[in-house]
């Protein structure tokens, strides 16, 4: 069976432009050049990451090419390493890697929950959104900022890139 090929993405929650640039530089070193970067969106639907900063913004990055979906746990471990370097004693960024294909947005997490599947090495995978009836749809467990539709335009662009690259490969 052929391994699924997907578009690698990551979300970055950051407190200021300096930390965003720093994060993109670190990610580019290990994952290559960004193909597209989303419009920044204020992260204001929850205060879950107030330990980082009470004022956060999220951007998403999509990286060039198709990659094997089986790398998701490795990507999360790499993201954790970058977060640890961001500032001590408390991290200054939150990096959430995942992937998009024709049907879904999958994100990695270190936290177990009923709707997450254990992958390996302490990492879980979650289908956060699905693409159905020509639009992105949330689930009852989908994070409020994703369910709001704030990232749908970016996810549509990534899905279109995935469709083109799959067709051309």
Image (cartoon, helix red, strand yellow):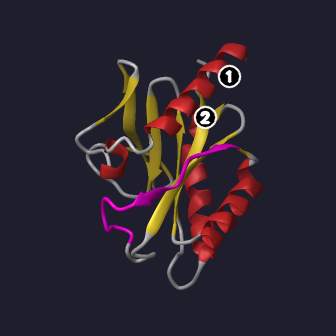
Nearer to me, 78 or 34: 34
**Magenta stretch, main secondary structure class:** loop
Q: Is residue 85 visible?
A: yes
Task: Check the picture and name the quadrant holding the N terminus.
Answer: top right
| Residue appearing at x 40%, y 60% in the figure | 43
Position of 94 with respect to 8 (left or right) is: left
Q: Position of residue 77 (x, y in %)?
A: 57, 58
SS class, disc 1? helix
What is the quadrant of residue 116 in the picture? top left
Vertical arrangement, residue 128 with respect to residue 169, above or below: below
Vertical arrangement, residue 3 with respect to residue 86, above or below: above
Nearer to me, 103 or 40: 40
| Residue appearing at x 60%, y 20% in the figure | 163
The residue that label 2 is drawn on is: 7
The residue that label 1 is drawn on is: 165
Does the magenta-highlighted stretch encompass residue 42? Answer: yes
Q: Earlier in the sequence, mark 2 or mark 1?
A: 2
Write the start and end of the magenta stretch as one range: 35-49
Does the magenta-highlighted stretch encompass residue 45? Answer: yes
Vertical arrangement, residue 138 with respect to residue 135, above or below: below
């Amino acid at each position: 069976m052929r391994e699924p090929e997907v578009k690698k993405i990551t979300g970055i929650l950051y407190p200021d432009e300096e930390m965003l640039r720093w994060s993109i530089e670190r990610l580019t070193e290990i994952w290559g050049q960004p193909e597209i970067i989303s419009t920044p969106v204020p992260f204001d639907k929850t205060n879950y990451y107030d330990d980082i900063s009470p004022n956060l913004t999220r951007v998403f990055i999509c990286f060039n090419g198709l990659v094997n979906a089986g790398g998701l746990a490795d990507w999360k471990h790499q993201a954790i390493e970058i977060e640890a370097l961001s500032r001590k004693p408390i991290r200054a960024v939150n990096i959430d890697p995942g992937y998009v294909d024709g049907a879904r947005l999958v994100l990695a997490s270190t936290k177990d929950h009923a709707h997450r599947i254990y992958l390996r090495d302490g990492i879980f995978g979650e289908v956060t959104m699905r693409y159905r009836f020509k639009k992105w749809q949330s689930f009852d467990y989908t994070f409020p900022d994703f369910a709001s539709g704030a990232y749908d335009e970016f996810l549509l662009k990534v899905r279109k890139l995935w469709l083109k690259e799959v067709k051309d490969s």
